[in-house]
Amino acid sequence: MQHVTLNNGLTMPQLGFGVWQVPDDEARAAVATALETGYRSIDTARVYDNERGTGRALAESGIAREELFVTTKLWNDEQGYDSTLKAFDASLDRLGLDYVDLYLIHWPCPGQDAYVESWKAMERIHAEGRARSIGVSNFTEQTLDRLVAETDVVPVLNQIELHPYFSQGAMRAVNARHGLLTEAWSPLGQGKGLLEDPELTALGEKHGRSAAQVVLRWHLQLGNVVIPKSVTPSRIRENFDVFGFELSAEDMDRVSALDRGGRIGSDPATVG
Ligand code: NAD
């Protein structure tokens, strides 16, 4: 496993396991399979409604807490100073943990105008050591610039939609300008269409790998943190087996050339 160093000096695995759309009772088995495979970073959120199942799998794994990297997120309707503190306590309780490794604001929700206050609560949680690192998700240039200007702790990363059809060059540069890592959500484009793209299939054949593995390799070589999701054990293992081959500069360009500039998910400017 490769690790990346955050702007606060801590490290995290560059490849993790996402559990969006995994029901709570299935999360336990999926996370258990991921941990058996070797994943140590798990990405959940309050709104995924599977913090309990995730926490149970973490506890049952017998893996030492310091070897695990657990991320959860503040949901939109919980933004605000006091409500963030309360939401964090509830997430920690459902996970059965006494700290998380990373706590994220899930969406900036500029219409609510509460992300700066929420961040100040997250700075307090961070100072108390209950979130080892704090970060953001779905932040745009405008919302990230304002957050950094008006608060003390710079987020460690920005988790954004990013896959070969939406490669987010401009936003990756904004994150880098502020010293944040970029974490890719829906890194496989949710599996829809992208993984059947002839260019990716051809690159897979060239390397004796699947299209999904080529895409994950592209992310890793770009420097993205990446959190693919699957509930299928063979795919969970396949998505982890991406450290034994390398894409050439030309292969990387072929994948990057697939960018269509189109999102699958919501536009952060309009959510909330
Ligand atoms: P993804 O890009 O990881 O795709 C997952 C889907 O791809 C699976 O359901 C499956 O259908 C398919 N798939 C997975 N592995 C495959 C393989 N090896 N071969 C063929 N098909 C395969 O999509 P995602 O779940 O949307 O994103 C990953 C994680 O990112 C989520 O689970 C969640 O943790 C996070 N996320 C965050 C946000 C946010 O707003 N912060 C939004 C969406 C997702």
Image (cartoon, rainbow, N blue to C red):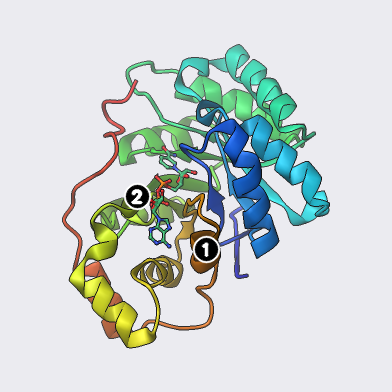
Q: Secondary structure at mark 1?
A: helix
- Crowd around label 2: few <14 · some 14–19 · many ≥20 (10 Å): some
Quadrant of the rendered image containing residue 258: bottom left
What's under tag 2, amino acid-wise? Gln
Q: Nearer the viewer, mark 1 or mark 2?
A: 1
Question: Label 2 belongs to which residue?
Answer: 190
Pointer 2 residue Cβ closer than 8 Å to ligand 1: yes
**Looking at the picture, how far across and down is residue 38, in whole percent?**
66, 64
Q: Residue at x 64, y 55 (%)?
A: 33
Q: Quadrant of the C terminus?
A: top left
Image quadrant where residue 172 sits: bottom left
x, y percentage for residue 143? Answer: 37, 33
Q: Position of residue 127 (x, y in %)?
A: 73, 34
Is residue 11 something one can see in this rendering? no
x, y percent for residue 216? 42, 66
Residue 44 visible here? yes
Instruction: Residue at the far left: name it.
Output: 260
> Which of the pair 243/231 is nearer the observer?
231
Alpha carbon distance from label 1 to label 2: 17 Å
- What's the mark number on residue 178? none
Measured along the vertical axis of the image, is residue 251 above or below residue 102? below
User: Who is closer to the viewer here, 204 or 233?
Assistant: 233
Residue 234 image label: 1
